[in-house]
Structures are given as structure tokens and as C-alpha cells.
Amino acid sequence: MLTNNARELLTAIVGKENVETSQASKLVYSFDATPQFQAMPDAIVSPRSASEVAQVVKWCNEQEIPVVPRGSGTNLSAGTTPLQGGIVLLMKHLDKILEIDEENLTVTAQPGVNTLELMEAVEAKGLFYPPDPSSMKISQIGGNINENSGGLRGLKYGVTRDYVLGLEVVLPNGEKIRTGGKLAKDVAGYDLTRLFVGSEGTLGIITEATLKLIPMPETKKTVLALYEDMEAAARTVSKIIASKIIPSTLEFLDQPTVKVVEDFSKIGLPTHAKAVLLIEQDGDAAVVEKDIARILSICEENQAIEVSMAASEAEAEALRTARRSALSALARLKPTTILEDATVPRSEIANMVYAINQIAEKHQVEICTFGHAGDGNLHPTCLTDARDKEEMERVEQAFEEIFTTAVALGGTITGEHGVGAMKAPYLHLKLGVAGVEAMRSIKQAFDPKNIMNPGKMFAKENRQRVVVKQ
């Protein structure tokens, strides 16, 4: 609990209206979009500038008070839950697009800028920012960078880190540094920019980002392919890539997911299909025509029972929106929805989906699977009820087996959601003990007092589930 003196000092830095300590406010920021993780902060502080961020962080470091940076709280790894109390540093005032540089093809923004608003702002100038997490209508650029978010377009265009050119970062001691810049080449020292991308707020606070833009694609076409079995859909994915075609989107939904999404969106999705591929290609009109013609042939050659092309952009957008709504649709069915993102090489997608189904049956839990088939990033999603302790034990056993299987197939425990507190017990599966210790050494060098988002990535083996500090 903050003392009166501490509250007064923070008020002097950010203003009275930007220091919240009521029980209601603390409860609001005690959890994020991750089920079963909750802990009360001591205060919510909303700085108005990078300078105020630096002052707050410097004081917290001196007092050894935890600091948890937060945007919209849409992350799915318990990355913004204040598990050790302290201060939630809310970025709601740092919400400006500072510059769109059409000569250098960059946009510079503060961390609180809404992802979709930034995308629309650059598109109005004929430019394109490709990273498109499903949470883009709500999420913020700072959170995307902290989690290294992906999205439907990741196969062709990459993820957030591929577009971060430079950062302004407040270090745990309150000092500000700048990394990178509007440069096509820069090998001056360690690549600190990439180090901070995906660091989940454990190394510093991002207060500004310079992002790469590319020209807007000339045209786009969308295909929906239906299959009677997952093997055929997986073969299609592999064959498309082997044919040297890289679609902008190559998404997969299993039948249970399709049924739930259709019930939610009511756009006429084919609920009779055992597997559905949503495929898009964009770029030069002639290239898109050629690629789509080949994609249609590949789908038919690999036992697609039906292949159709969206007749209009409105129809295509409806399909994309339906895919993005998968989590929302599934969340309506049970009190608790746990969405994960085990990732495997593309060639192992069918084996991984088969394994997920077998694991779900073994542990008697309900799991629907969808995801980014083109880059092997699958989202096994468990529908359960956190109040049923016995079932939750089976759920956790199932997910541990899923992560172990993914790594055994050459994959990883997370493709885009991050580690946070939720996956910290499994990080060693991917990196090994020596790899985790190497990361811990980096954390120690930047943050020797461990004030930056403590309890994330390096949490204890047992998950820190619902722990509400009053």
C-alpha cells in the first residue's frame, strides 16, 4: 500500500487526476485478458509524457516498487497482471501519432496509439502497416511491441519486430535511451531495438516507436477452401508454400470452431466442412491473378470438396472479420476460455492438430483449434470452467502436453502471445535451463532491483493463478 507521502510525490509528477488508488480502480487493473490471473496493484499512474515516465520509474527504482506497463490489457499470457503489487503504469495519455514520414516510409508514434487507428492513418496516405493482431481494434502499439504481436498477415509480411526501426525507452534507473532510427542499415553495437521488442516490459518502458511502412498493395483476392479432413487441408498448405507462393493470409479453422464462429457471425460459413482454409493474396494485379489461379488448382488437387472466391471486398472483409472473432465466439460457450498459441513447422501442422485432438480426448477436455496455418501458429482453445478445480487440473495437464508435443515437433510454446506469467513454467521446454539463465542474466543487467514487470518470464514453476491482493 502506498504511503501518503508516496501518493503526494506521484501526484506532484503526473497530476492528481492521474494517480488512482481507489479499490474500484485497482480492481479494474488487477487482471488482463488472460483467465485466472489476478492481483491488485497499489496504484494506477498515468504519465503524460516520456519525462514523467522517467521520473516515476526512477522513483520506483529507488524505492524498489514494482512497475507494470500497460496499454489496453488485451494480452493472453498474463503479461500485464501486477502479480507483486506496485504501480500499473498506464499509457493512455501517450496516444499521439507524432509523424508520418512519406519520404522515408516511416511512422513515429507513442505507445498508447490504437493499432487500427495507426493502420488507417497511414493507409489514408497510400501506405501500409502490415502487423494485424486480432485485437487490433482495441490493442495499442506499445503492447504490440512488448509482445511482438503477429496476426493474419504474418506469413507474408512478418510480425511486429519486422517493422520496428527505432525506439525511445526509459530504463529502470529512469534514464532515457534511443535505439535505431529511420535507417535501412545500422550495425552500431548491439541490436537493442530487437532486444526490447518482445521483452514484455521486463527491461524498460517504451515511450516512442518509429515503425517501417511499405506501399499499399495494389489489389487483393480472397479464397475459401473446404475439406473433409485435416490431412488434406494441411497438404494444401504445404503444397502452396512449396509452389513458391507466399499468400498474405493462410488461415485454418477446424469444424467445431467454424460452427461456433458461424453461430456468432451468421455470414454463411460452411459448418459441414471438417476443416476450412481462408487464403488471401495481395500485390500487383497480374501476380495476384496468377497466384490465385494456382492456389485454386492446388486446393482442388488436394481434395478440397469446395473452393470459392469472395465476390466482393465486403464479402472478403466479412470472412476476415469472422476469423478474427473466433476467440469472442468461443468465449460465449463456457465461463472460462483459455486460448494458447503452440507453433510448429508448417510441415507438422496435421500432426500437431491430430495430437491436440488426442490430448483433448485423453484428458477429457473440450478444445477447438484454429490459427495461422501458413506459419504453423495454431491456437488450441479450451472451453472450461475455472470453478471446476478437478477439470482445471486436467486442462493444465493437457496444455503442458500440447506444449511438450509442439517443441518435440520442432516448434515452440508461443508464436505470438508471449510468455508472461502463464507460460513461464514452460519456457525451459523451448530454451533449456541454460537458455533461460542467459535471459535471466540480461534481465539482471538491465534491472538489478527486479522492478520491471516482476514475475513474468521467470516465474516459479507452479503457475501463479488467481491471487487477489487487497
Image (cartoon, rainbow, N blue to C red):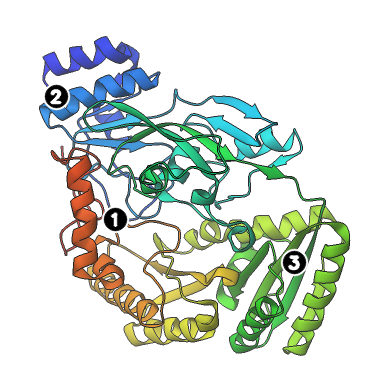
Q: Badge 2: few (under 14), some or many (20 or more) residues near its Cα, within 10 Å? A: some
Q: Position of residue 51 (x, y in %)?
A: 34, 18
**Quadrant occupied by the C terminus:** top left
Residue visible at 75% across and 45% down? 216
Report the front residue among 120 and 197: 197
Task: Name the foreground residue: 361 vs 43.
Answer: 43
C-alpha distance separating marks 3 and 1: 34 Å
> Which quarter of the figure has residue 118?
top right
* Amino acid type of the residue that numbered disc 2 sits on in the rendered structure: Leu
Is label 2 in contact with label 1 (beta carbons under 8 Å)? no
Residue pointed to by mark 3: 268
Q: Name the residue tied to disc 2.
A: 2
Horizontal and vertical percent for residue 198? 39, 50
Q: Is residue 202 above or below residue 23?
A: below
Q: Where 408 falls versus 61 (above or below)? A: below
Q: How far apart are labels 2 and 1 at the CA level?
A: 26 Å
Q: Looking at the image, which is closer to me, 282 or 463?
A: 282
How would you rate the neighbour count of disc 3 (Cα within 10 Å): few for under 14, some for 14-19, many for 20 or more? few
Q: Earlier in the sequence, mark 3 or mark 2?
A: 2
Observer able to see residue 21: no
State which tag comes first along the sequence, 2 or 1. Answer: 2
Alpha carbons under labels 3 and 2: distance apart: 54 Å
At 34% from the left and 14% from the top, the residue drawn is 17
Query: What's the mark number on residue 36?
Result: 1
Q: What residue type is disc 1 on?
A: Gln
Element carrying mark 3: loop
Residue 322, by quadrant, is bottom right
Per the image, label 1 sits on a secondary structure element best described as loop
Q: Amino acid at mark 3?
A: Gly
Q: Nearer the viewer, mark 3 or mark 2?
A: 2
